[in-house]
Image (tube, coloured by chain):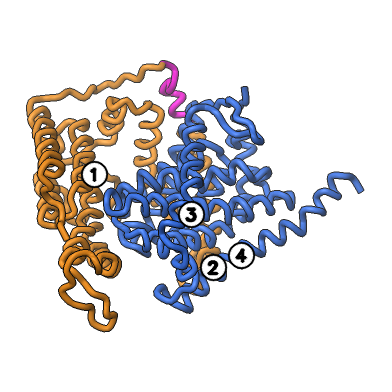
Amino acid sequence: MTQEKMSEKAWIVPAAAAFIVAVAIALYMAWTLIVQGTPKWEVRAFFGSLSVSTWDIVVAPLWIVGTALFFLELSGRTLKGFKIVKYSVRWDSVDLATAALCAAVYGGGLAATGGLTIIPGSTWIRPANIFATLFGMLFGIPGAIGIAVGNLLADSLAGFLGWGSIGGGFIGNFLLAYIPYKLVSDPSFKRAKAWFEYYLFGAIGSAVWCAFYIAWFLAVTSGTLTTLPPLVAWGFFAPFVIVNNAIAFIFTPLLGIVLYPLVKSWGLFWKDRITYK
Amino acid sequence: MSWVYGLYIPRSTIIHRIDARVKTIWVAFYFLVIAFFNDPTVSIPIFLSIYLFAILGRVPIKRLLVVFAFFASSTIVSFASWIPYYGNVGQPIGTLPFLGWPYTRYGILYAINVPFRIFTPVSAIAVYFSTTKPYDMFQALMKFKLPYKAAAIESIALRFMPVMYKEAIEIQEAQMSRGLELQKGNIFKRIRGYVPIFIPLMVRMLKMNIELAMSLEARCFGSKKIRTFLYELRMKWPDRIMLAGIIFTFVGLAILRYGYGFGTLNP
């Protein structure tokens, strides 16, 4: 047995565990929400058990790091391992078309379900979130930028545009695509390691980071720029966003398996289009 | 869903003829100004002033219905969250039946104000999209020093959103005619049901991606660093008057708010 096959076998158990944990979290959150209803939802009660100021302090580093990563990427630098390296996205007609069409598909998909409101003026049921991690893994930075722009356009069309869309939603959605782009090594999902990485970082990690990123901004600017009370931002908004994302993300690998070969063969896969300096 | 036929509604009105840069500043004005005030007696006239522009621009009422569709639910959520939140701010004037929460004048007025703060930017952007050509919007964003590739992403995405939406509907109808069930089952089954729609949609998107890239290349996209336009935006005197009006109103409201405390609720 070759070393590669042995290492592949070693990843099967962690991958299965990550998959079970992600599905269990999504199922548990969705099921308890349906059975218990919003006011008695135990996940909401858990989020409400910590004080607003505790959440604000604990989550602040996530907001700062998320924002720093966004601007780092815009400046033409990226994290490779633990080092900051210069890289270049071509931003030619192909990258531009990719970003624009990712925005169109994501924005159109989100706006189409804009009527299924969860918190008026803040969020709604979003099955199109299934695209967020997928576009990040397949198209890299153009895909992540497309997701951020698409969310902004969907907010405008579905009646949710506000300061929260700019200060929280834009980079929050960018992170949804960015985290799997950086941390999932194989979007073809042929290796068990990719499943492990996806469900741990892509599904759970990005869902939680995005929810916390936006909720922190809403809580901190509550009353000045945004309109949700901090308690609602942490107690309702954050768990709703997590469950919304987590359910959609479970199905993303199904799309990845089918679409990766096409994306790769048409020369659109991000690893084929990026150069490190 | 009127936007699926395109966001811009061609008409010959004074609002349509206003320079896209001025209209962009007009949207920013509402974003900023509505955040100044928490007194509904000020926020409501600001909100309603958008509808004056909507009437002048002959924006169809259906386009603005998205705002009113959510208004009732937004008001309920606002009352349910802000009244208890400010239950101790100011003099309690009663308790809510069944819940027993005290409520104050401050809490009620604040809760009334919140939906107007939510829907003012939304209404402004709806009027903006309906009365501004995508080509002019693109140019206006560039004039505000947004890199032209970033402006192009935004305007191409806006152009293609209705196209992708129509593609998705066609694929959905085709799959449903083959027996796909989207209306039955729990939330997992319903989301899983979208996978046979999303895969052909993505394949279509990839094909469009290549076609769009080729058409951009054919028009020498990116060959020169400076982007030029066949029809340049030019400020005329009505644009200058409107711009002066926006700046004057903004400065006036800012002075009233931060100099004299106008439009703020006191407990």
Mark 3 to mark 2: distance in Å? 14 Å
Q: Amino acid at mark 1?
A: Phe
Q: Tell me which segment is drawn in magenta.
A: B213-224
On the image, the x and y values in percent for residue B157 come to 39, 40
Mark 1 to mark 2: distance in Å? 38 Å
Mark 3 to mark 1: distance in Å? 27 Å
Q: Are marks 3 and 2 in contact (CB under 8 Å)?
A: no
Q: Residue at x 40, y 75 (%)?
A: A39
Q: What secondary structure is found at the residue carrying circle 2?
A: helix
Q: Which mark is residue B5?
A: none
Q: Amino acid at mark 3?
A: Asn
Same subunit: marks 1 and 2 = yes
Same subunit: marks 3 and 1 = no
Q: Residue at x 28, y 27 (%)?
A: B144
Q: Amino acid at mark 4?
A: Val
Q: What secondary structure is found at the residue carrying circle 1?
A: helix
Q: Residue at x 46, y 45 (%)?
A: A63
Of tags 1 and 2, the one toward the viewer is: 1
Location of mark 2 (residue):
B188
On the image, the x and y values in percent for residue A62 come to 50, 47
Location of mark 1 (residue):
B31
Q: Chain B is which colour?
A: orange
On the image, the x and y values in percent for residue A23 come to 61, 65
Q: Are marks 4 and 2 in contact (CB under 8 Å)?
A: no
Specify the farthest residue to the bottom.
B98
Location of mark 3 (residue):
A129
Let me know if residue B223 is in the magenta part. Answer: yes
Give neighbour class at mark 3: few <14, some 14-19, many 20+ (Cα, 10 Å): many
Q: Which chain is blue?
A: A
